[in-house]
């Protein structure tokens, strides 16, 4: 009976290792890499490295999302996120990041309220400069969250596209 249980456990571990791959050991490079929505991975830009090197308290909502494992998903259900390099399965190739990624992202712009705008929320700026965001009264909370989820996933995909290094021919045609 113990032999059967040990055999089953060994089989399950073997299948998991084959599907997920073994983690990288002694992987050189920056501590983290970025996993894209499609499961590919890339190096980090200088701006991302600086961001991840900052001291951030545990309760800060602006802290980066760090994946606990390769298959972990964020609150929007996306596979995207930063992961420790050694936790990335060895069979996943780490692609380079576009050398102008940080400038490209800056040009893209980002406003934390854009997801709320996508959901049709009412955004008011008060006289003191503070902002009040009221949920769209014409749709359910679930529909509002789904619209924000879709916006966030589309925004992630756009950032991931900007990080891609294109071939010289693609670059000339861009």
Image (cartoon, rainbow, N blue to C red):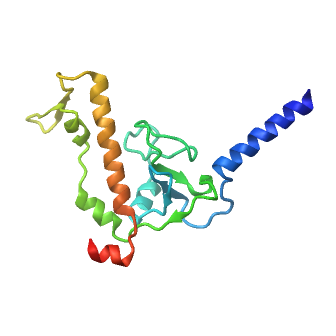
Which quadrant of the figure has residue 89?
bottom right
Residue 167, position as x, y percentages in the image: 39, 74
- Which is nearer the eye, 46 or 151? 151
* Point 42% across, 60% down: residue: 50
* Point 69% across, 43% down: residue: 16
* Point 39% across, 68% down: residue: 98
Q: How many discs mark residues in the rendered view?
A: 0
Residue 102, position as x, y percentages in the image: 33, 64
Left or right of 82 in this view: 148:
left
Quarter containing the N terminus: top right
Residue 26, position as x, y percentages in the image: 67, 63
Which quadrant of the figure has residue 52?
bottom left
Residue that protrudes farthest toward the left in the picture: 127
Q: Is residue 143 above or below residue 94?
A: above
Residue 13, position as x, y percentages in the image: 75, 42
Left or right of 69 in this view: 141:
left
Q: Is residue 155 above or below residue 143?
A: below
Q: Is residue 85 above or below residue 151?
A: below
* Point 18% across, 32% down: residue: 120
Quarter containing the C terminus: bottom left
Which quadrant of the figure has residue 126?
top left
Q: Is residue 103 above or below residue 169?
A: above
Left or right of 173 in this view: 12:
right
């Amino acid at each position: 009976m113990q032999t059967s249980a040990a055999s089953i456990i060994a089989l399950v571990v073997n299948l998991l290792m084959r599907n997920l791959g073994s983690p990288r050991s002694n992987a050189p490079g920056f501590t983290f890499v970025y996993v894209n929505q499609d499961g590919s991975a890339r190096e980090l830009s200088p701006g991302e490295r600086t961001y991840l090197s900052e001291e951030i308290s545990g309760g800060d909502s602006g802290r980066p999302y760090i994946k606990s494992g390769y298959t972990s998903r964020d609150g929007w259900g996306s596979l995207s996120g930063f992961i420790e390099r050694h936790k990335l399965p060895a069979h996943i190739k780490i692609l380079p990041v576009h050398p102008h990624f940080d400038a490209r992202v800056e040009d893209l712009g980002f406003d934390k309220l854009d997801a709320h705008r996508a959901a049709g929320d009412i955004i008011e700026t008060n006289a003191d400069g503070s902002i009040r965001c009221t949920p769209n009264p014409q749709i359910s909370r679930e529909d509002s969250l789904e619209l924000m989820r879709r916006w966030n996933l589309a925004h992630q995909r756009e950032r991931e596209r900007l990080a891609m290094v294109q071939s010289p021919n693609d670059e000339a045609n861009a």
